[in-house]
Image (spheres, helix red, strand yellow):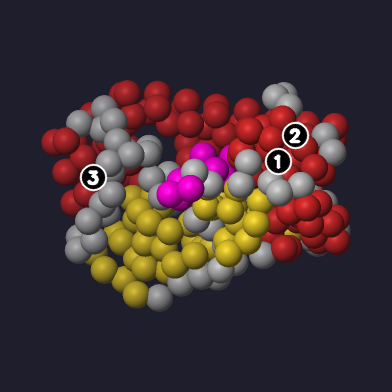
Amino acid sequence: MTSSKKQTTLNTSHGDLASIPCELLQELKAEQNTRAYKKGQILFYEDNRPFGLFYLNSGKVKLYKYTAEGKVFITRIVTAGELMGCRAFFTGEAYSTSAEVLEDATVCFFEQPAVQAMQQACPEFSFQLLGKMGKELREAEAKAADIAYKSVSERLANLLLSLRTSCGQTLSDGQIRLDIQLSREEMASLLGTTVETTVRTLTRFRQLDLLCSEKKQIILKNVTKLAQLAPAN
């Protein structure tokens, strides 16, 4: 792992820091501690205490926790522009998940005093983070309901459409490449099912000409039909 301070350009063109006024953002940038992480490295562990906020400048991170049976359950995928650890930071509780780098990433860490100073100088920042936490809670509740009541096909369609929003790249022929590489185990964990069931469902989607694979990435061939398989909650 490499580390540098005040040398990496903070990407704030979109995401959780985009609405902060420029002058305040410059102050926050001056306090950033930036590190480059390789795939598989851990940012923080479940049940550890937070000392600030993590900001994903580039790359992707998976948040996960262990079930009572010791299996890994991925709660969500974090993409560039997102803050991590907000709920634990603001409630003073331990992290409810662990964070592992899914693909090489640049991560900025803002220590508690810097975040608190930003809150005082820009109350809108606090309201924005409250909105973010509310959104994440709604998504977690929806995911729990999906696992309980929806078929694996419906859940897979929902997952692919969600990844299209966060990681999708439109190709020249109108198809959508998902700019993320997930193993079968990670896909199964996101769906809340077994690897075998995940593989069977992906095969069925290929047979229906809904998707294909290229260089370990999924390409969505028919988003309209996928949406028909993913009824709203």
Left or right of 56, for residue 223: right
Left or right of 9, for residue 137: right
SS label for mark 2: loop
Residue at 56% in and 50% down: 77
Report the disc number at residue 28: 3
- N-term-proximal mark, 1 vs 3: 3
Crowding at mark 3 (Cα within 10 Å: few <14, some 14-19, many 20+): some
Report the disc number at residue 157: 1
Q: Can residue 45 be seen in this view?
A: no
Mark 2 — residue?
229
Which residues make up the magenta segment?
162-173
SS label for mark 3: helix
SS label for mark 1: helix
Residue at 73% in and 63% down: 185
Q: Vertical placement of 100 versus 81: above or below?
A: below
Q: Vertical placement of 126 versus 190: above or below?
A: above
Q: Identify the amino acid type marked 3.
A: Leu
Residue at 40% in and 27% down: 128
The image quarter in which residue 124 lies: top left
Q: In the rendering, at what x and y percent does residue 174 appear?
A: 49, 44
Q: Residue furthest bottom?
A: 1
- N-term-proximal mark, 1 vs 2: 1
Q: Identify the amino acid type marked 2.
A: Leu
Query: Is residue 169 highlighted in magenta?
Result: yes
Query: Is residue 156 highlighted in magenta?
Result: no
In space, the residues marked 1 and 2 are separated at their CA atoms by: 6 Å
Q: Can residue 228 be seen in this view?
A: yes
Give the camera-side residue of 201 and 184: 201
